[in-house]
Amino acid sequence: MDLITIEYIGKQPKLVNPILIEGLPGIGNVGKLAVEHLIDNINAKKFAELYCKDFPPQVFINPDGTIELVKNEFYYWKAEKKNQRDIVLLTGDYQGLSSQGQYELVDNILAILKKLGVKELYTLGGYGLGHEINRPQVLCATTDKELVSKMKKLGAVFKKNEPGGGIVGASGLLLGLGKLRGFKGACFMGETPGYLVDPKSAKAVLKVLMNLTKIDIDVSALEKKAKEIEQIAQQLRDFETSTKEKPEDLKYIG
Amino acid sequence: MDLITIEYIGKQPKLVNPILIEGLPGIGNVGKLAVEHLIDNINAKKFAELYCKDFPPQVFINPDGTIELVKNEFYYWKAEKKNQRDIVLLTGDYQGLSSQGQYELVDNILAILKKLGVKELYTLGGYGLGHEINRPQVLCATTDKELVSKMKKLGAVFKKNEPGGGIVGASGLLLGLGKLRGFKGACFMGETPGYLVDPKSAKAVLKVLMNLTKIDIDVSALEKKAKEIEQIAQQLRDFETSTKEKPEDLKYIG
Amino acid sequence: MDLITIEYIGKQPKLVNPILIEGLPGIGNVGKLAVEHLIDNINAKKFAELYCKDFPPQVFINPDGTIELVKNEFYYWKAEKKNQRDIVLLTGDYQGLSSQGQYELVDNILAILKKLGVKELYTLGGYGLGHEINRPQVLCATTDKELVSKMKKLGAVFKKNEPGGGIVGASGLLLGLGKLRGFKGACFMGETPGYLVDPKSAKAVLKVLMNLTKIDIDVSALEKKAKEIEQIAQQLRDFETSTKEKPEDLKYIG
Amino acid sequence: MDLITIEYIGKQPKLVNPILIEGLPGIGNVGKLAVEHLIDNINAKKFAELYCKDFPPQVFINPDGTIELVKNEFYYWKAEKKNQRDIVLLTGDYQGLSSQGQYELVDNILAILKKLGVKELYTLGGYGLGHEINRPQVLCATTDKELVSKMKKLGAVFKKNEPGGGIVGASGLLLGLGKLRGFKGACFMGETPGYLVDPKSAKAVLKVLMNLTKIDIDVSALEKKAKEIEQIAQQLRDFETSTKEKPEDLKYIG
């Protein structure tokens, strides 16, 4: 069994000089949230499913009672205006579980993208701060020096030595291995506390993506989700405060 | 050394349009208990043993002092009535240890099943609730929409978003990878607290299997085991209650 | 790089119907202690070193300041009397680290043994009881039923359902995979508390080996080591008792 | 995708009977600090980058905002005086993550070195003592007996049974596997507490390297770093002392 199985849905799309936008599960699920929102909003079409034996041995259950093997998914969207470009979108349930699996998987994905004519990669993720943040900025890192000033103009921020640990996972590896294979691109990282899924951070990332893609994206659904998460976060803070004030009560728990 | 070694006992059976019933170790050991009970009850014949280097490096010791390398086992049973079908049964000591190993192993098993003419897969497992349950229901998920109503008629239950985490391990992967390879089927998951082996849940699963296979199965042995386990569970609850009441006694333990 | 590298020292020995005696690191280091003692005592000759990439990436340092890559070692001994048989001995620094590595390694070792004409395997190990034991017995498990009574005559003991967890690691796998490859043999497991290296248990195993091999082995060195370990064990028990009696003293540690 | 990708920068250097000096991340980062300092000091030229799928799936971010896939790096330096030799230097971000990966990676590196004409390997590391040390010695281990006295003359120290656990990782494996492939060499291990990066220990190692290479190395930058680390260590000790004296204060932390 090969590392990946790629199942095309209908014909492969014919795209003109497309860019990739990738968002897989990660810190605050920022990247995945942003790409899924974008897919819904621009009505992108799924054209391939990717199964990988480095994903967990797991199926999810659809609302209709049928199962789905865990997977990654490729979508595409064709430019509607002259200042826009065709887009390939990549999201999914999981990243590879092992280090070697991640490398192999990303290498396979790059080969698929090359066949589709993709030369530019934009990867999305979260930058975990470990503390609350009011107005998340979108940090950036690029494959090439000349992209730095371009990305700044789109609203992305470059902070020296941040993230200090670099970028771990598919968003980093797509750029890192991609650079070796001749791709160019950038990673957009929305600042996030990192404790919960973070639609507010995803919204900040989408704002930069709007500037990049020249697409108008309605972010009201993300804003609604952000409010729900904020309520959950407040409840967790309240619970923490109440248990801190009366630690002796804890003796009766468990 | 190949991932799996398959040792046939005598000739491979000639089966007419057989179905697979699989039950390997898992939550509450529900699936394994159910299939082993079925094998005993219908006097199914073992026709192959499967060894796999993704199992633990371990032998078990038989009552007569001889060793057995850990393995999976294939049995078959030939239909005795017109409304019945031939059955291949799969059980064993372990599932694969690693994610990649699980994918490879299940892929190998699907190839073996295809050669035997199997097109329908019924996999058994437990659905861990984390709390006691009086009358375990049997949850279900299927490869195809049209199987949902069929399985409901057999007594299986579909609950939206349950199990929320999907199905992890061989029972899920057989259906997930199987679907990609052209198989159809369903997974029956007996509700179980998940703390101990659960013959009561296995019995519930067997009731659904009786409806599926049109075989009368004597479940009295499982009922007896269920009573024994219930006694052990009660003893554990009593012990917990007593230690909670007198926590100071714990100081003298260990 | 292949999984194993085998380096022969001089020519491969020509042996007549040899048996294997294996003892690698494990519970109480019983097997390794026993085989190393036997090698010293009968002056067996090393004829091969086995390196394996599933061992840790580690070198040991010899007393003379030179390094040695961690390895397994093969020795041989040629029968001196008519009632004796040629012997291949296997010991070493490590077993394979991963499950798949263990299977591959043992499979490779079996191929080497087959070339040497070995058909019978005797593997040594410890059976961890988790409590002190005065007179360790030597439990046994065999590949074949007819070997059970033979091993009983040598002083080995068969207890129904013991060890309950079977045999994990090379000692079990050599017999388990070996059986599939046409080898016969037995595993001798010296009972041991399992907390410390256990020369007393190794001595008990050697007593059975003496009966098997018809070789007189001087076990006085093991007896001396056993007394040293007993002193260490007593000191640990004393320390435990003293710290239990005065738990408040612990406040001043660390 | 192969385990390693090697990217040459310009032409491969033509070297005359060069030696290798290796220092990768490890205990106290002693080896990496020493080699990086040496590279800066002698102005060695980078000629190759090595990427490996057994490294973490990670990119680092340069000060200019561009990303770098984690890697190892090869440098060279050509002898300037008659009593000096050409040098290949190896350093990098990571060692291999898995045992099998470490073996494969080191085996690949040895093949690269062989092509460059390297026959002698000098590997650097730290020897973690677990306690403070005023004047770190440089322990040594060699592939061959005749190298022991040579290394002693350079100022390296041989202590019987130290390090007791041998040498784990690339520094040990380069010598261990290298010995099997016909290389000779030694490992220099600077004594270090092992808690923090240790420029003082790296300086001690460089002193021995100066004797080996007949190169004058300015260690003032390392001495400055060592003072900074000593201040941090003192602050940590002060903090520990203060918290030990007033343990009740800890209740208000976190």
Image: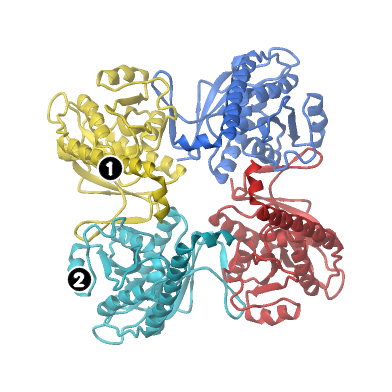
Chain colours: A yellow, B cyan, C red, D blue
Q: Quadrant of residue C251?
A: top right
Whether discs 2 and 1 lie on one chain: the answer is: no
Q: Identify which residue, C104 or B248, lies in the foreground.
A: B248
Q: Position of residue A41 (x, y in %)?
A: 15, 37
Q: Looking at the image, is mark 2 or mark 1 nearer the viewer?
A: 1
Helix, strand or loop at disc 2? Answer: helix
- Say which residue label 2 marks: B152
Q: In this view, does D53 lie above or below C247?
A: above
* C100 sits to left or right of D200: left
Looking at the image, can residue A23 be seen? no
Q: Mark 2 lies on which chain?
A: B
Looking at the image, can residue A32 be seen? yes
Q: Mark 1 lies on which chain?
A: A
Q: Which residue is drawn at 75% across and 38% down?
A: D162
Q: Residues within 10 Å of mark 2 (few under 14, many from 20)?
A: some
Q: In this view, does C250 lie above or below D220?
A: below
Q: Identify which residue, A152 or C178, lies in the foreground.
A: A152
Q: In which quadrant will I find the C terminus of chain D?
A: top left
- Say which residue label 1 marks: A235
Give the Cα distance between marks 2 and 1: 40 Å
Q: Where is residue D90 in the image (x, y as percent from the top left)?
A: 60, 27
State the count of labels: 2
Give the amino acid type for the residue marked by disc 1 in the picture.
Gln
Q: In which quadrant will I find the N terminus of chain D?
A: top left
Helix, strand or loop at disc 1? Answer: helix
Q: Position of residue A13 (x, y in %)?
A: 20, 40
